[in-house]
Image (cartoon, rainbow, N blue to C red):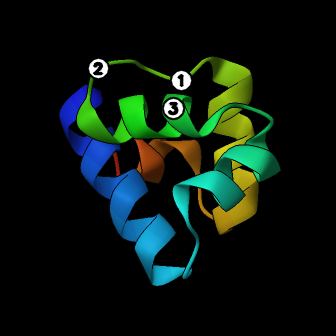
Amino acid sequence: MEIKFKSNLKALRIESNMSQSSLAKAVGVTQQCVSAWEQGNMEPTLSNLWALSEIFGISIDFLVGKTEY
């Protein structure tokens, strides 16, 4: 999951003109956590995936690279 997830997350965040800090606040995590996700050093919890999918209006499957947008 990590390779597709990290690139998808960063691309979605940039497309949405969001900083790591603003995304972190929306999800309820720290900016360091978002940075670790984007670097592939950490994976999100299921509840974090759910929050991210709602923020970006996409499916969790797309977010983790299982399906195309």
Label 3 SS: helix
Q: Check the image and report above or below for 5 versus 30.
A: below
Where does the image place residue 64, in percent across and percent down from the top left?
A: 39, 40
Label 2 SS: loop
**Which residue shows up at 41% across the image and 39% down it?**
35
Looking at the rendered image, the quarter that the N terminus falls into is top left
Residue named by callout 1: 44
The label nearer to you, 2 versus 1, is: 2
Q: Is residue 69 visible?
A: no
**Which residue shows up at 24% across the image and 43% down it?**
4
Three-letter amino acid code at the position of disc 1: Pro
Where does the image place residue 39, in percent across and percent down from the top left?
A: 26, 36
Q: Quadrant of residue 37?
A: top left
Out of 2 and 31, give the one closest to the viewer. Answer: 31
- Circle 3 packing at 10 Å, graded few (<14), some (14-19), many (20+), is few
Residue named by callout 2: 41
Three-letter amino acid code at the position of disc 2: Asn
Looking at the rendered image, the quarter that the C terminus falls into is bottom left
